[in-house]
Amino acid sequence: EVQLVESGGGLIQPGGSLRLSCVASGFSVSSNYMTWVRQPPGKGLEWVSIIYSGGTTYYTDSVKGRFTISRYISQNTLFLQMNSLRADDTAVYYCARVDPNYFYYMDVWGKGTTVTVSS
Amino acid sequence: QSVLTQPPSVSGAPGQRVTISCTGSSSNIGANYDVHWYQQLPGTAPKVLIFGDTNRPSGVPDRFSGSKSGTSAALAITGLQAEDEAHYYCQSYDSGLSASVFGGGTKLTVL
């Protein structure tokens, strides 16, 4: 079964760091485009970052220089390293697989992990 | 302010037809980037309804359909059912931002 399971969320103080993980099953993270999307409480979806199968990465402007997307092939896991966290980073973070045949089409989603940035 | 504009809410009675619009610009929908639609039930992850403007994944009822023209796209739902009550989001890519973009979301209420 194709599945994504996120973990690593929690309560963190402003300025702190957190690393989110997303374990994939049923397909290879390294052979696919993978992305992170977040949703602040009571608000809409916001794209965060993407890593192409070749390793190229892109970020939304608000997280550039603070967040890093990466993958660990042997564990079939996607990561999001989040540094210098701010209150407006508070959100549910979803990882998703991107179908390369349709631009940024996210065909498989995890259930999400919640990040709360607060003192 | 979202790059893609959706109405905050729409409503319809069971059995009726509703449409949800998604208005963009020449750097996203108007540049012919794919438009995708997602349904999000409360407390759950988004689920894809339409990809590549008009395609339905297997398992999605044909009551859901997508269209695109110029700088706008639309999701149509026919034969409205109570379980269709959810938030709906359109998504595309914006070349000016070099980023994927979502609409602000539309809350569908089944009366």
Image (cartoon, coloured by chain):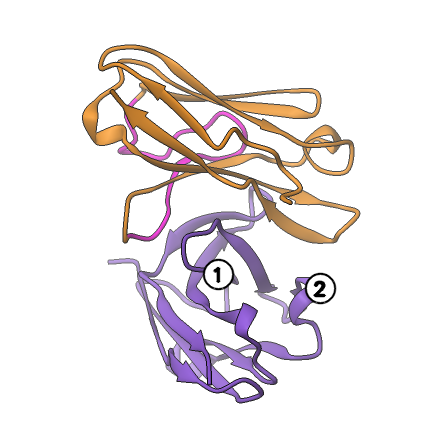
Chain colours: A purple, B orange
* Residue B104: assigned label: none
Q: Give the residue displayed 57% in from the left and 34% down from the top.
A: B35
Tag 1: amino acid: Arg
Residue with the mark numbered 2: A61
Give the magenta-colored segment's residue range: B44-61
Q: Secondary structure at mark 2?
A: helix
How many marks overall?
2
Magenta: main secondary structure equals: loop
Horizontally, residue B42 falls left or right of residue A37, namely: left
Q: Secondary structure at mark 1?
A: strand
From the top left corner, tell me how far across and down residue B56 is, in percent: 39, 29
Label 2: few (<14), some or many (≥20) within 10 Å? few
* Residue, disc 1: A38
Task: Return the disc, 1 or 2, that comes first in the chain's sequence.
Answer: 1
Q: Looking at the picture, how far across and down is residue A47, in whole percent?
A: 56, 56
Reply above or below: A37 against B10.
Answer: below
Q: Amino acid at mark 2?
A: Asp
Q: In the rendered image, which quarter is residue B21 located in?
A: top right
Q: Is B74 one of the magenta-colored residues?
A: no
